Image (cartoon, rainbow, N blue to C red):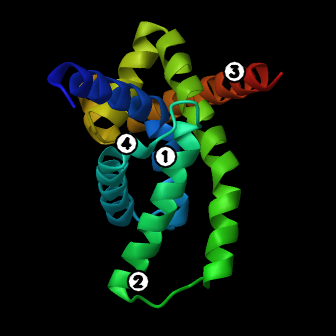
Amino acid sequence: MNPVSEEKSQDEFVRLLASVTTQLMSYIRILAFNNREDTDEVFQRTCLVLWQKFDQYDADGNFGGWACRTAYFEVLKLRDARRKVQLLGDSAMEALAIAAIPLSEQWSQRRRALVECVEKLDDDHADLIKRRYFDGADVQTIAEASSRSIHSIYRELTRIYGILMRCVETQSWENTV
């Protein structure tokens, strides 16, 4: 392969992977029973295998489906390698993998909707959400920094949660209609 086509192939791979990353992570998280370490490890292994086998991918195919199927096999490999007590047999694991695909798509849509909804918040609400969840500040620290009571911060966060929940539900509903 010449350098130009290899670069083009890399660009195409990165574009395709970026388009399914959220869905793929959700899918793996379901199969890994929400274990963060296993999810991260399987995701890394899956990306490596996808890249190694990218020349076998049919450009007219469903990259997300191909990626999820690859992830499924990586979950099985990890499970076998660790020889943990297996909560599910092979047929149950296969059924979970099939059921996880629409769930991961739904979670991906809801995450995208949440991002859009957070962007719609007024500046004060967006700042509070940023400090609490992106900066990792606890409620007491936020209350002290803003000279407010902890109770008032919790009340405001509860109101913002309601705003975000309604917005996400509306966005999700609009995307399904």
| Marker count (numbered) | 4
Question: Mark 3 belongs to which amino acid?
Answer: Gln
Q: Earlier in the sequence, mark 3 or mark 1?
A: 1
In front: mark 2 or mark 4? 4
Give the secondary structure at mark 4. Answer: helix
Q: Is residue 168 left or right of residue 42?
A: right
Using the image as rendered, state which of residue 86 and residue 132 is in the foreground: 86
Image coordinates of residue 119 in percent, x first then y, are 47, 13
In front: mark 4 or mark 1? 4
The quarter of the rendered structure image containing the N terminus is top left
How packed mark 2 is, by other alpha carbons closer than 10 Å (few <14, some 14-19, many 20 or more), is few
Q: CA distance from mark 3 to mark 1?
A: 21 Å
Q: Residue furthest left?
A: 3
The quarter of the rendered structure image containing the C terminus is top right
Circle 3 residue: 171
Q: CA distance from mark 2 to mark 4?
A: 25 Å
How packed mark 1 is, by other alpha carbons closer than 10 Å (few <14, some 14-19, many 20 or more), is many
Question: Mark 4 belongs to which amino acid?
Answer: Phe
Circle 1 residue: 24
Q: Residue at x 53, y 64 (%)?
A: 31
Q: Are marks 4 and 3 in contact (CB under 8 Å)?
A: no
Q: Earlier in the sequence, mark 4 or mark 3?
A: 4
